[in-house]
Image (cartoon, rainbow, N blue to C red):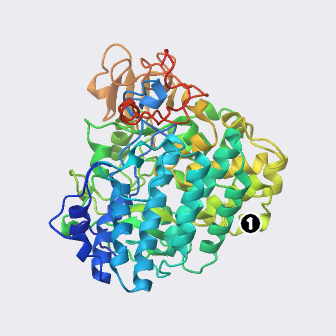
Amino acid sequence: MKAKYIFPCIGLMAMALSSCDLDQMPQSQLNPENSFRTENELKLYINGLLTQMSGSTTETADNGIRLTLPDYMTGLRSSTISAGSWSWSNLRSVNIFFKYSVNCPDETTRLKYESMARFLRAKFYYEKLKTFGGVPWYDIVLEDTSPELYNPRDSREFIADKILEDLDTALKSLPADKSINTITRWSALALKSRFCLFEGTFRKYHGIDGAERFLNECVEASAELMTSGKFAIDMTGGPQYAYRDLFAQPVTNDASDIEVINAEAYNFSLGVKHGFNYSLTNPAGNRTGFEKTFVNSYLMADGSRFTDIPGYATMTFSEEFANRDPRMAQTIAGPGFTRVGETEADSETLRDAFTHAVTGYLPIKYYTAAISDAQNSNENDIIIYRLAEVMLNFAEAKAELGTLTQDDLEKSISLIRNRVGMPALDMRYANSNPDPYMAALYPAVGGSNQGVILEIRRERRIELAMEGLRYDDIMRWKAGALFIPQFLGAYIPGEGGYDLDGDGKNEIYVYKDNRPPTPLLRGAKPLKLGLDIFLSDGDKGYRVVNTEISKSWNEERDYLAPIPSRSLVLNPNLEQNPYWDSPWN
C-alpha cells in the first residue's frame, strides 16, 4: 500500500492516562491539567487510541467452519460467562480526552481531535449495541465514588441516537484528506453507513420502530462517500487478480488506497507483522474451511445461478469451480490455485489446501507468498473500511426502503462486479424470478423487492467474506436459523482416487479399510474414512466436522448476548437481557 505506516502504538499519554477498569482513577506521571494544550499533545493521545480500530481476517458464523463451534451455536453462552466484551476501558480512555482537551486554546485544532474521539466513542457504543442492546451511556470520566457507576441501562433507541449524534458532530470537523492510517471524514461516513444499515435492518426484521430513519441515514452517508471522487473500485491486476491483490498484494503495490478507506498497516522491516498465512497452514491450528452454502452462492461467470444446474449438489470439486464468478478462485483454493508471486499451479499445493481445511475449501483471501508462512510473517495490510462495502450498504438500504432503482445498482453493485468481469445485476429480472435457493436461506425476505434483496445478500456474502461482517449480518437479518443445519464441505463420491484440479491425476485417495499400496496411489495422499476424513453418508457424501457437537439457537434470546452476572451483582440497577436467566440456560 502507498502508506505503509502503523496506527501509532506509542501514544504514551494515552497509556499513561488511561486505566483498565471503569471505576479506577487513571495512573499517570503526567499532569493532565497541564497537558492537552498543543496540537502535538492532542495528536499523540489520539494516536494512542487508534489501536481501537481494527480489521478482520477471520470468518465464522455459517461461512467459515472450524474444528470447534463457537458458544453462540451450541447454547453454551451464559450470564456467568460473558458472550461479548463488557470491558469499558476503551471508553474511559476516550472520555479522558474529552475531559482535558478543553485545555487546548486553539478551537479549530481541538474540534478536529475531539471529532476523532467522537468517532471512537461512536464505534465503541456501536459494538456494545450490537452485542447487548441498550447499555449505560457515559460521556464523563467515572471515579470510584461516582454515582453514575450504578446507572441503569439506557434504551436501544437512546444509545443509537447518541451514536448518530457523535458521528454527525464528528463529520463537521474531521479532515477531508485521504489517509488509511487515521480517522478522517471518510472513516466517519463509512462507519455511519455500516452502523445505520445494521440498526435500520435490525429494527425492520426484529419488529422495532424507526427502521426507515436509519436506512435513510445509511443511504445519505453512503452516497456522499460514493460521489466524493476520493475512492473507486480497485481494478489493478485485471479480473484474474484485482480482487485477490486488494488483500494479498505485495508491499510494492501502490494502488490499494484507491478503494481502501482505512486499514491496519503492517511493515516487516519495522517488526510489525501478523500471522494469517501461518494460521492457514499450521497443522495444529483451527483448520478453517468455507461452508457448502457459501460455495453454492457464487454465480456462474455469465451471471446465471449455479444452483439452477441439474446435479449441482453432487458435483466434484473440480467440476463445481468451472466457469464460476472469478472471485471464487480468488477467495478459495481451487483448480489452478497459485500463490502470490508464483505463475504456475502446483497440484501438491492444492492437495495440501484441500486436506488442511476441514471442509476442503481453504480460504485464501489475505493469503500471500510462501515467504510469509512462518509464524507472524505477514505484512499485507488488513482492511477496516473500503468503498465496496459502502456501495453494498447503499444498495441494500435502498432496496429495504423500496427506493432502489436500476441506476442505483449501476453505480454500486455493477461496479463491484465489473472488477472481475461479472455481468451487472438486473433488478427487474431478479424481482420477477427470485432465486429459490437463496429464498430458502432467508425466508423472512418478501415483498416486491424480494428477488433483488436476495441478490444483494448474495453479493455481500461473496464480496465481504473474511472481513468480519457475516455474523453481524445474520443478527440484523434475524437469520440465526442458518446456524442450526449440519455444516457441509466438498462432495466426495466414494472410495477411490479423487482428481481435485481436473488434470487427470489424483491428488487424494479415499479408502475405508486397508491403505492402498503405494503404486496405486501414484502420489495421491491417502485419507482414511472415519479417521482422516468424515463424510455425511458414511462412505460417501459431503465432508463434515463437529458431528458430535449439538447445536442450539433460541430465536427469542440469542440475538443479544447476556450481560455478565458479575456486572449485575456490582450494579443491581442493570437488567439482564430477556431469557438469559431462564432455568434451562
Q: Residue furthest left?
A: 29
Question: Residue drawn at (47%, 17%), measured in percent from left and top?
Answer: 539
Element carrying mark 1: helix
114 and 411: which one is in front? Answer: 114
Residue 482 drawn above or below residue 335: above
Number of marks in the image? Answer: 1
Task: Mark 1: give few (<14), some (14-19) or many (20+) Cα within 10 Å.
Answer: some
Corner quadrant of residue 8:
bottom left
Judge from the rendering whether residue 359 lies leftward or rightward of residue 514; answer left or right.
right
The spot of residue 379 in percent (x, y) is 28, 63
Question: Residue drawn at (63%, 59%), measured in percent from left and top?
Answer: 392
The residue indicated by pointer 1 is 408
Q: Is residue 477 visible?
A: yes
Quarter containing the N terminus: bottom left
322 and 368: which one is in front? Answer: 368
Judge from the rendering whether residue 110 lies leftward or rightward of residue 35; answer left or right.
right
Residue 565 drawn above or below residue 181: above
Question: Residue drawn at (60%, 30%), measured in percent from left and top?
Answer: 481
Corner quadrant of residue 521:
top left
Give the amino acid at mark 1. Asp
Q: Is residue 490 visible?
A: no
Judge from the rendering whether residue 137 lies leftward or rightward of residue 297; answer left or right.
left
The spot of residue 525 in percent (x, y) is 32, 32
440 and 36: which one is in front? Answer: 36
Corner quadrant of residue 306:
top right
The spot of residue 579 in percent (x, y) is 55, 25
The spot of residue 545 in percent (x, y) is 42, 26
513 and 566: which one is in front? Answer: 566
